[in-house]
Amino acid sequence: MEIIETDVLIIGSGIAGLFTANLLSDKKNVILITKNNIDNSNSILAQGGIAAAIDDNDNWEDHFKDTIIAGKNHNLEETTKQLVKGANEAIKQLIDLGIPFDRNEDNQLELGREGGHHKRRIVHAGGDATGKEIIKSLINHVKQNITIHQRVMAYDLIIENGKCVGTVAKNDLDQLIIYKAKHTILATGGIGRLYTVTSNDPTITGDGIAMAYRAGADLADLEFIQFHPTMLVNEISSNSLISEAVRGEGAKIINDKGQLIMKGVHPLEDLAPRDIVARQIYNSIQSGEKVYLDISMIPNFRQRFPSITKLCEQNDINIEEGKLPISPGAHFIMGGVKTNLHGETTIPRLYAVGEVAHTGVHGANRLASNSLLEGVVFANKLAKYIIKQPTRVVDFSLPTLIKEDLSLPSLQEIQSVMMKNVGIVRGKEGLLTAKKWFEQFIPFIKAKHVLDIPIEQKIKLNMITVGWLITTSALQRTESRGGHYRNDYPDSNDKLWLKRCIIRRRNENESYQTENAFTTIV
């Protein structure tokens, strides 16, 4: 068994992990490990862009207001202010890194508009390839200054005297590696692959949330899952995203009769917050209708959206017909590992950044193009905090490893349970069905030792763990709010649930705790 020591260990290679690595690389010895290749992440798939109030007719207060409205007033307001106030500096940092953001004829940044935004404030690159341009540049910057271990999967965090001192990992040769670190950062992304239809990269299976749970960290808001309204869906594809920016340029959602299904549903109609649009499409499909994105009114579609055009061609969809078949798919989890403004979790020396973290900025429903922004803004705060920390001696002893041969269901079975029972629309009966199914694996979910099992089994165990946590959290929240919609509690209940988070923490008698959403860790 190999033991590797470093100042900072970063787990994950999306924008949050790479940007943090870039900021720390001059001051600290940094190792970044990633489950697959360095360019496997949700960030590289991001089409839309980054929200920032840089136009003369815009300001951070309006961006803040749109974020709070989309989040159904469940956001941590002070943290959300930090997010939107940091947007302009984030764009400047990315420009300094050489990101070729799209510009108009006057060489001004070209701004798009997306759902939930009342103004055009989306900065984009390569038309609809913003994430690809950012990640490509970040990889080029960090690869000379940090150590990158690809195809290494983190298994479990190592906790010594209540502090995180590293992680147990395994490479693609099934060899165990111990990483000993003064600071360990989770940047593993979300949980999209728990669902059949998703925009997420195949590597995104909730690993960071599962590891943090097993280590005893606080988790929050796991019931809030955003389903993107417009996934390209036909016989060939169910996991290709159609950016909200397409609707920002005028596209409309129609049914097979040509009717505008968002008309009269919300003042912003097709640009309403994602939870509203996704449910409306879901309801139309459930009633037997086919749903399409009408792009016929967008001039120069191929030039404005080259990545989406390529997706359509790969899936035998003729964009000249002007109608793209769509369905909602799992996109983003608003909850995650609870952190403060500096990225600290409730376990000392363990941090979380990006989608895996619960910063509170997204509330119950993330505003479009705030995710890449979150990765940059909170990477800045985390890196500054770590740089200021004194050099520490790491107490360290090897964890107990237990070899097991687990009998676990297939990925498809897990996804089917989640999609059917814990999806866009939920109810008590379906949630109880999912809970019962997941709890047959409780001995593995709550194992006290690191299970030395094959990578494929570890991924499934993580999916089962997070699926159970999401399901049981959704059962607890007896209301509908943002990305959590229950047909047996279809209304928001401000009296009982406004500003209340469901906190999950592993203990002997698994308990649920609610606390005011404005209570942050200090």
Image (cartoon, rainbow, N blue to C red):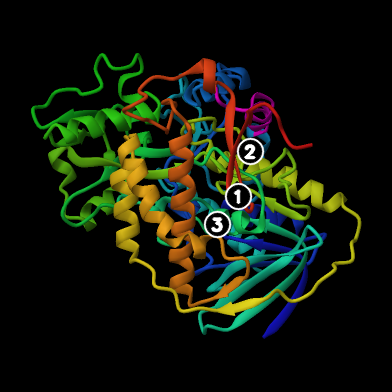
- The mark that comes first in sequence, 1 or 2, is 2
Label annotation for residue 302: none
In this figure, which residue is indicated by the disc labeled 3? 210
Instruction: Name the residue type under label 3.
Output: Ala
Q: Is residue 396 above or below residue 225?
A: below
Front disc: 1 or 2:
1
The quarter holding residue 148 reads bottom right
Question: Contact, CB < 8 Å: mark 1 with mark 2?
Answer: no
Placement of 249 over or under 35, stated as above or below: above
Mark 3 neighbour class, 10 Å CA radius: few under 14, some 14 to 19, many 20 or more: many
Label 1, on which residue? 509
Label 3 or label 1, whichever comes before in sequence order = 3
Circle 1 SS class = loop
Farthest left residue in view: 257
Residue 198, given in percent of the width and then of the height, sits at 35, 49
Q: Position of residue 450 (x, y in %)?
A: 61, 71
Give how far apart the Cα atoms at labels 3 and 1 are: 18 Å
Q: Is residue 14 left or right of residue 424?
A: right
Q: Is residue 404 left or right of residue 199?
A: right
Q: Name the quadrant of the N terminus.
A: bottom right
In this view, 290 is above or below 182: above
Q: In the rendered image, which residue does mark 2 sit on?
A: 359
Say which amino acid is labelled 1.
Asn
